[in-house]
């Protein structure tokens, strides 16, 4: 397997470790052997990186509208809430 965005056929690159055959997509690192890659995949930094990448949800149209201030209007008080300033005088 090669870097993200490549085809199934990996061109061997003599400048990379193991000619670029062992690559961790999550960490963007090349490894010298399959054993080194498998060992890396068991490490805490790799697992943290995978969790970080899998945890973020992609943005959608609702997020974009909310960020632009075009989301649902917030008119009036919430049910059951009095605003918290009742009884305070200036």
Image (cartoon, grey):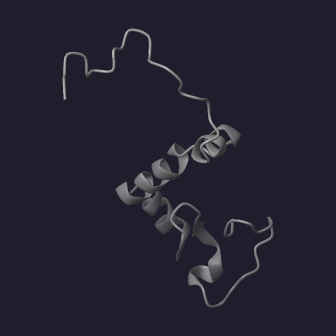
- Residue 48: percent from the left, percent from the top? 41, 53
Q: Is residue 65 above or below residue 46?
A: above
Q: Residue furthest top?
A: 80
Q: Is residue 71 above or below residue 42?
A: above
Q: Nearer the viewer, residue 58 or 27?
A: 58
Residue drawn at 43 percent across, 61 percent down: 39
Q: Is residue 82 above or below residue 41?
A: above
Residue drawn at 19 percent across, 23 percent down: 89
Where residue 30 sits, quadrant-wise, is bottom right
- Residue 64: percent from the left, percent from the top? 65, 46
Left or right, 5 with respect to 20, comes to right
Where residue 72 sits, quadrant-wise, is top right
- Residue 78: percent from the left, percent from the top? 44, 16
- Residue 26: percent from the left, percent from the top? 54, 60
Q: Nearer the viewer, residue 14 or 67?
A: 67
Q: Nearer the viewer, residue 36 or 48?
A: 48
Residue drawn at 80 percent across, 70 percent down: 9
Please identify the quadrant where the C terminus is shown: top left
């Amino acid at each position: 397997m090669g870097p993200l965005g490549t085809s199934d056929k990996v061109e061997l690159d003599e400048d990379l470790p193991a000619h670029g055959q062992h690559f961790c997509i999550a960490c963007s690192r090349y490894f010298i052997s399959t054993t080194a890659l498998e060992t890396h995949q068991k490490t805490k930094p790799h697992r943290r990186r995978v969790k970080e990448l899998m945890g973020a949800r992609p943005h959608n149209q609702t997020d974009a509208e909310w960020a632009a201030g075009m989301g649902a209007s917030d008119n009036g008080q919430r049910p059951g809430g009095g605003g918290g300033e009742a009884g305070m005088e200036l």
